[in-house]
Image (spheres, helix red, strand yellow):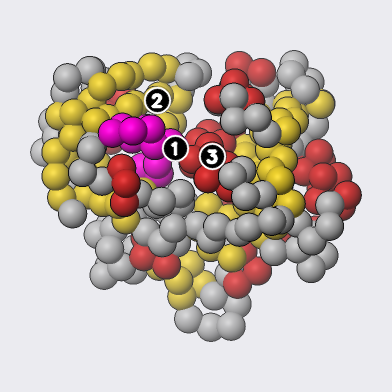
């Protein structure tokens, strides 16, 4: 579904991370955690491909996108202002699996915390959710208060110890996983973080948000394909971007 949305609010969460709320009443009820939208960069003729932005949150008639400014496309999108129109395609991708009655560990590294907010909002209704957020420094942690307002347990970790526990986010995440009975893990962040979690938990299912360059966004071009352990490929835009990590080669 390709349509126009109106930008309602823009704010910077860190020096590199932007939060954008858009008004999209026709699709908020159809959008599920884990899905994303392809956003057209209108003002640049040399930026033909849409930028895939995960849905960070849904409230009423509004969708929230949070992205890190890393290239020409996201630089242009970061210059958006309230009242601007965005051309979007979506919702795209396969929704994250939603469990009931489980202990859930949600682990976000850096801007990887963004898509986990909407997921946590949904999971907490019927599960016990522990949120672990990490970043290099306190100034790079995002959405801490947003998660706390969901009334879930939130643990922080920073590489330099400027907020929460000193060290990688995987340390408190592993401790939480080992103390829970049959937990389920959702993680989003650097691929090294996802790989560590997958390789160091025993018999615990880990679902990860993976990121790759996306061309078409609907599974035709295979630009975002990742190799499956048992052969073949998964297309992140169609079969993901949330995938069972034990199933793929990282």
Q: Give whichever of 60, 44 is nearer the camera.
A: 60
The residue beneath circle 1 is 56
Mark 3 crowdedness (10 Å alpha carbons): few <14, some 14-19, many ≥20: some
Is 55 magenta? The answer is yes
**Is 3 placed left or right of 125 in the picture?**
left
Q: Are marks 1 and 2 in contact (CB under 8 Å)?
A: yes
Mark in front: 3 vs 1 = 3
Q: Earlier in the sequence, mark 1 or mark 2?
A: 2
Q: Is residue 224 magenta?
A: no
Q: Secondary structure at mark 1?
A: strand
Helix, strand or loop at disc 3?
helix
| Quadrant of image for the C terminus | bottom right
Q: Which mark is residue 19?
A: 2
Pinpoint residue 47: horizontal percent, then vertical percent. Answer: 19, 41
Kindly identify which residue carries mark 3: 121
The answer to which of 46 and 116 lies nearer the viewer is 116
At 65% from the left and 29% from the top, the residue drawn is 151
Alpha-carbon neighbours of circle 2 within 10 Å: few (<14), some, or many (≥20)?
some
Q: Position of residue 39 (x, y in %)?
A: 24, 42
C-alpha distance separating marks 1 and 2: 9 Å
Front of the two marks 3 and 2: 3
Q: Position of residue 243 (x, y in %)?
A: 53, 63
Tell me the quadrant of the picture where the N terminus can be found: bottom left
Whether residue 141 appears in this view of the structure is no
When the figure is inspected, residue 53 is found, relative to residue 71, above or below; the finding is: below
The image quadrant that residue 41 belongs to is: top left
- Asked if 145 appears above or below 151 in the picture, the reply is above
Q: What span is in magenta?
A: 49-65
Q: Is 162 located above or below residue 192 in the figure? A: above
How far is disc 3 from disc 2 in space, using C-alphas? 17 Å
Q: Label 3 vs label 1: CA separation?
A: 10 Å
> Magenta region, mostly helix, strand or loop?
strand
């Amino acid at each position: 579904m390709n349509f126009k949305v109106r930008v309602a609010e823009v704010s910077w969460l860190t020096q590199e991370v932007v939060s954008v709320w858009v008004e999209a009443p026709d699709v908020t009820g159809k959008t599920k955690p884990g899905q994303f939208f392809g956003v057209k960069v209108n003002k640049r003729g040399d930026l033909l491909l849409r930028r895939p932005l995960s849905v960070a949150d849904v409230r009423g008639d509004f969708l929230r996108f949070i992205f890190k400014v890393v290239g020409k496309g996201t630089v242009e999108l970061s210059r958006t202002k309230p009242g601007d129109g965005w051309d979007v395609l979506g919702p795209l991708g396969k929704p994250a699996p939603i469990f009931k009655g489980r202990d859930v560990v949600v682990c976000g590294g850096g801007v990887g915390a963004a898509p986990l907010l909407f997921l946590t909002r949904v999971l907490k209704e019927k599960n016990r959710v522990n949120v672990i957020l990490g970043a290099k420094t306190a100034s790079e942690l995002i959405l801490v208060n947003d998660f706390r307002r969901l009334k879930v347990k939130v643990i922080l970790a920073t590489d330099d110890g400027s907020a929460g526990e000193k060290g990688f986010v995987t340390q408190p995440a592993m401790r939480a996983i080992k103390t829970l009975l049959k937990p389920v893990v959702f993680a989003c962040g650097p691929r090294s973080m996802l790989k560590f979690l997958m390789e160091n938990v025993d018999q615990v299912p880990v679902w990860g948000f993976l990121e790759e360059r996306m061309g078409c966004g609907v599974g035709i071009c295979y630009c975002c394909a990742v190799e499956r352990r048992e052969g073949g490929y998964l297309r992140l835009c169609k079969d993901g971007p949330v995938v069972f990590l034990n199933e793929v080669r990282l």
